[in-house]
Every structure is written in C-alpha cells, then in structure tokens.
Image (cartoon, rainbow, N blue to C red):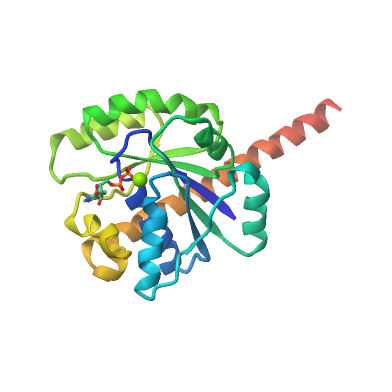
Amino acid sequence: MKTIVIANQKGGSGKSTLTVHLAAAAEQAGDGPALLSDTDPQGTAGDWFNQRKRTGLDTPRYAPLDLADLHGRLMALRDAGARYLFIDTAPSIGSVNAELFAKADLILVPLNPTPADLRALVKGLPLIKQSGRPFSFALARVRANLRNNEAAAMALEALGLVLPARMHERVIYAETFAHGKTALEIEPGGIAATEVSALWRAVRARVKESEKGRKRESEKGSIQERETA
Ligand SMILES: Nc1ncnc2c1ncn2[C@@H]1O[C@H](COP(=O)(O)OP(=O)(O)O)[C@@H](O)[C@H]1O
Ligand SMILES: [Mg+2]
C-alpha cells in the first residue's frame, strides 16, 4: 500500500478538494482499492464521505486512523488489500503531521501560485523536508492566464519537484462538499474530470519513481557494504 499525505499549513490551499478527487480518480483509473483518511479535526473529507454514502457511491472507502498506533493501523489497511491511502491533514505544523510525514510514500503539497502562498510555504517546508520522505508540489486553484502562475511555478521548481499536471480554479470543484461527489461524477469526461485524471497519473508516476529511486539507493548501499567487507 502506498500512503499519500496531502499537506500544506495554509488553510484554503485546496488540500481536502485535492484529496477526495485523487482518491476518486485512483478508483476510476482501476488503481483501487483506494482509501481516504482525515486527520483534520474540521473533518472536511470525513463529512464528504458521509454525504457520498447517501448518494449511493461507496468508493473510495473511508478509513479512520488511530494516531496512537499509526504503524499498526497502516499495516492492517495494507493487509486488508488497500493499494493507495490518501490522508487529508489539518493546516498546522504540529507533531501529528510530522508523524504522518514519516509514514508517507509521497507528501503532496497543493499550493495556489500566489506570492502569499509561496511565502507561507517557506514556514511549512522545513518540517516536510526533515521527514526525509519524497514530496511534490501540486499547483491547485490555478486561475487561468495569470502571469503569476509561471513565475510561481519557476520559484517552486527551485524548492522541489512540481507535478506536471495542475488543478484549476473551477466552480465544479467548489461543489465537491455540497453533495459528496467529485468532478469525475458531476461531469464525466469534462475538462475538470480530465485534469483530475491527469493529476492522478502524475501522482502515481511520482510515487513509482521515488520508490525506484529508493531501491537504487539501497542496492548501491548493499554493493558498497559488500565491497568494503
Ligand atoms: N480548484 C478549486 N476550484 C474552485 N474552488 C476550490 C478549488 N479547490 C478548493 N476550492 C474551494 O476552496 C475552499 C477551500 O478548499 P479546501 O479544499 O477545503 O482547502 P483546505 O483543505 O486546504 O483548507 C473550499 O470552499 C473549496 O470548495
Ligand atoms: Mg481541508
């Protein structure tokens, strides 16, 4: 099971919207079972799941996390057959998020390409980097044709990898928490559904690349150990 933690200490950056869309897109792409967890006391993603059940949709499934035994809980979800776990987080730089980062196969940081969001990132990024886990930025709530967008993307490239797919600011995403649906079901094949699918493919590729990178590193390590033995 691959664990993807969606985090940005700035509220309103689009974490919860991105989390539920990625989990739904993973299911739609045949990459399920995908699970959704929410560690934000505000419970946006959890509420979304409850609304979704009422619409008759039952994937992605919701998995409550036991933070007192995070490792045990993740192992149990893996053993139950989950392939991807998407964890929505609170907008804070607290110890809970540090524990989650340590378990992440990928930390995904959604970010509006604005100077204010870039400045806020400077405060949150050290904790992410301290975890030593792979992380990527995802441009979210992008307003089309703003000159800022490309400047922000370039500034971000200097700080870490930026996913090649973006989530734009669209009315259809703002509906997400009204009825427990995603753009994938509201308008199948629409422009938002298409970009969400592309975003999921980019995330999936990034998870695979970083896994390969880690394998290469550990192979290099064991060759060096043998050579020095
Ligand atoms: N791409 C988007 N387009 C339009 N509205 C969005 C988009 N992403 C988020 N929103 C809206 O912005 C608000 C904050 O988004 P949310 O995902 O809850 O952010 P966070 O979890 O980071 O606080 C919500 O009202 C949501 O509907
Ligand atoms: Mg949220």
Q: Looking at the picture, how far across and down is residue 160, in whole percent?
A: 41, 32
Any part of residue 193 in sight: yes
Q: Nearer the viewer, residue 215 or 10?
A: 10
* Residue at the extreme front: 41
| Relative height, residue 129 to residue 192 (above, below) | above
Q: Looking at the picture, how far across and down is residue 113, in whole percent?
A: 24, 36
Location of the N terminus by quadrant is bottom right
- Count the numbered circles shown: 0
| Relative height, residue 68 to residue 124 (above, below) | below
| Relative height, residue 220 to residue 195 (above, below) | above
Q: Please report the residue visible at 53 percent of the width from the left and 37 percent of the height from the top.
A: 101
* Residue at the extreme bottom: 56
Q: Please report the residue visible at 36 percent of the width from the left and 49 percent of the height from the top.
A: 16
* Residue at the extreme right: 229
Q: Please report the residue visible at 20 percent of the width from the left and 49 percent of the height from the top.
A: 169
Q: Looking at the picture, how far across and down is residue 90, in whole percent?
A: 41, 40
Q: Please report the residue visible at 36 percent of the width from the left and 53 percent of the height from the top.
A: 199
Location of the C terminus by quadrant is top right
Any part of residue 189 in sight: no
Q: Looking at the picture, how far across and down is residue 25, in whole percent?
A: 39, 62
Q: Is residue 1 left or right of residue 92?
A: right
Q: Give the image quarter of residue 170.
A: bottom left
Q: Is residue 3 left or right of residue 45?
A: right
Q: Give the image quarter of residue 110.
A: top left
